[in-house]
Image (cartoon, helix red, strand yellow):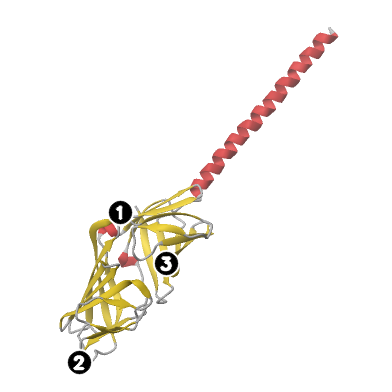
């Protein structure tokens, strides 16, 4: 009878121990699920965003160039372009080994500028002074390394100061007022998967990086070739872009508390221009 009682109590003790272990295991599973959900909630960047030029703010710093007597100068360019022949011939850019520039005066109000890398044209800009030379309209055509489809965009600028005597009417200092961006160029997609953060766009620019401050390759662009990431808050990150090891720009990106808008403050290290670009979640 005593042995039976001991066996009974031993069984009860084992059942209680098993029950406690099951309870602990259940709590661990719940905790894991809550952690996973929390991680998703802490990744507000994941998704597709559409840039809204009308809600963006552009740097007030002017774009200054002149074309007179067959020579082109751009004092706001980096590097500065001084006394380039405006005859359409390719000429080297100082400090940029693989890059060249070709400038051509189309007429008394229009200038065309072509940039090449290793003999291949990747950017063409045609700027025309209109509205009694108070407005500058520029059409830019870019070509990406891995895509034959040209990317076309337009900008409008207002004149600052007076016109330059005896120069092409497009010459002078200009401040950007309007940015016209085609639909396929206005989209970008972010995906935060574990420690990897991936960015891509329909035009082919893409990269994957970790938040460790190291440089990671950027594919599909002539303007940048590496990116490094730093997390600055629950809804904020900082991306630093380089070309050939030289700092190009820093983008500080923040998602709004409601998760609907993405604000990017983009600062050019070379020109000092700061643009604030707003994007809407799709």
Residue identified by numbered label 1: 202
In this rendering, the answer to whether 58 lies above or below 39 is below
Residue identified by numbered label 3: 244
Marks 1 and 3 sit apart, C-alpha to C-alpha, by: 24 Å
Of residue 73 and residue 61, the one placed in the foreground of this image is 73
SS at circle 3: loop
For the point 29% across and 73% down, the residue is 100
Q: Position of residue 125 (x, y in %)?
A: 24, 72
Q: Residue furthest right?
A: 2
Q: Earlier in the sequence, mark 2 or mark 1?
A: 2
For the point 81% across and 11% down, the residue is 5
Marks 2 and 1 sit apart, C-alpha to C-alpha, by: 44 Å
Residue 180: quarter of image: bottom left
Q: Residues within 10 Å of mark 3 (few under 14, many from 20)?
A: few
* Mark sitting on residue 166: 2
Q: Residue furthest left?
A: 107
SS at circle 2: loop
Q: Earlier in the sequence, mark 1 or mark 3?
A: 1
Q: Position of residue 263 (x, y in %)?
A: 41, 63
Marks 2 and 3 sit apart, C-alpha to C-alpha, by: 39 Å
Q: Earlier in the sequence, mark 2 or mark 3?
A: 2
Q: Position of residue 140 (x, y in %)?
A: 24, 69
């Amino acid at each position: 009878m005593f042995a039976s009682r001991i066996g009974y109590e031993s069984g009860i003790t084992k059942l209680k121990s098993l029950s406690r272990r099951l309870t602990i295991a259940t709590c661990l599973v719940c905790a894991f699920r809550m952690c996973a959900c929390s991680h998703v909630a802490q990744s507000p960047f994941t998704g597709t965003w559409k840039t809204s030029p009308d809600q963006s703010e552009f740097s007030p710093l002017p774009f200054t160039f002149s074309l007179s007597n067959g020579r082109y100068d751009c004092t706001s360019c980096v590097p500065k372009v001084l006394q380039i022949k405006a005859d359409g011939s390719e000429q080297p850019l100082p400090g940029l080994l693989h890059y060249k520039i070709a400038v051509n005066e189309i007429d008394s109000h229009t200038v065309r500028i072509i940039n090449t890398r290793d003999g291949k044209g990747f950017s063409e800009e045609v700027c025309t002074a209109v509205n009694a030379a108070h407005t500058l309209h520029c059409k830019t055509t870019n070509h990406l390394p891995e895509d034959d489809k040209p990317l076309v965009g337009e900008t409008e600028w207002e004149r600052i100061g007076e016109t330059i005597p005896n120069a092409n009417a497009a010459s002078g200092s200009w401040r950007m007022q309007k940015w016209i961006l085609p639909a396929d160029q206005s989209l970008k997609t972010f995906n935060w998967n574990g420690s990897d953060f991936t960015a891509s766009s329909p035009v082919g620019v893409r990269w994957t990086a970790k938040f460790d401050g190291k440089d990671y390759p950027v594919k599909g662009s002539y303007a940048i070739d590496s990116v490094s990431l730093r997390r600055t808050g629950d809804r904020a990150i900082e991306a630093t872009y380089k070309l050939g090891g030289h700092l190009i720009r820093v983008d500080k990106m923040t998602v709004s508390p409601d998760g609907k808008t993405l604000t990017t403050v983009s600062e050019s290290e070379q020109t000092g221009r700061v643009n604030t670009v707003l994007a809407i979640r799709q």
